[in-house]
Image (spheres, helix red, strand yellow):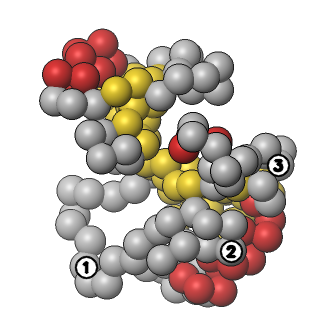
Amino acid sequence: MADREGAVFGVWEGGVLAEWSIGGERSPAWLELRTADAFDAALFYGAVLEWGQGDGDRYSDTSYEEDQVVLRRRRRPVAKLNSGPVEEATPRPQLRPRWLVHFKVPDLDRATALALENGGTTATGPEWGGGGQVTLQDPDGGLFTLDQVSPSPNGNA
């Protein structure tokens, strides 16, 4: 499906694997939406996905912070909806309205090298990368970001 601005998304029906949770400290990923109007997007996704219904198994908290809407589940951030400039008719897909998955990795250089070895390419532009992260495109053009995480004191990332 796509939202009003054209950001493509999918929905999952069914259970979530216990070891796969989005947004928590030990979670392997978190989500980000780049869109022209985060508040309007939050209203759309809130209606479609029933965010903020108070059910403990749903996204139960949203807040508007510095031009972005932050969605939380059990008080942990799971997604950010960012307002900002987007261009629909551009050859640079990272500037179009879209969702981006951030994968947490313990070794950013190694993970980036493996992505490139397997057919990925780096996304270009000053808005991508730096600060312990790199944005890549998979061989089909799908964007994703690798975020460097520090190992925990017990040695786990």
Find the distance from the CA under tag 2 to the CA under tag 1.
27 Å
Q: Earlier in the sequence, mark 3 or mark 2?
A: 2
Closer-to-camera residue (69/38): 38
Quarter location, residue 104: top left
Mark 2 or mark 1, earlier in chain: 2
- What residue is shown at x 79% (from left), y 44% (from top)? 85
Pointer 1 with pointer 3, Cβ within 8 A: no
**Which residue is labeled 3 in the image?**
67
Q: Can residue 46 be seen in this snapshot? A: yes
Mark 1 lies on residue: 15
Whole-number angstrom distance, CA of label 3 to CA of label 2 = 18 Å
Disc number lying in front (2 or 1): 2
Q: Which is nearer the N-term, disc 1 or disc 3?
A: 1
Residue at figure coordinates x 61%, y 73% from the top left: 3
Query: The C terminus lies in which quarter of the figure?
Result: top left
Q: Is residue 11 left or right of residue 31?
A: left
Q: Is residue 66 left or right of residue 109?
A: right
Position of residue 66 relative to residue 156, above or below, is below
Which residue is depicted at the point 37% across and 44% down? 141
The numbered disc on residue 4 is 2
Up the image or down, 34 lies above or below 7; here it is above
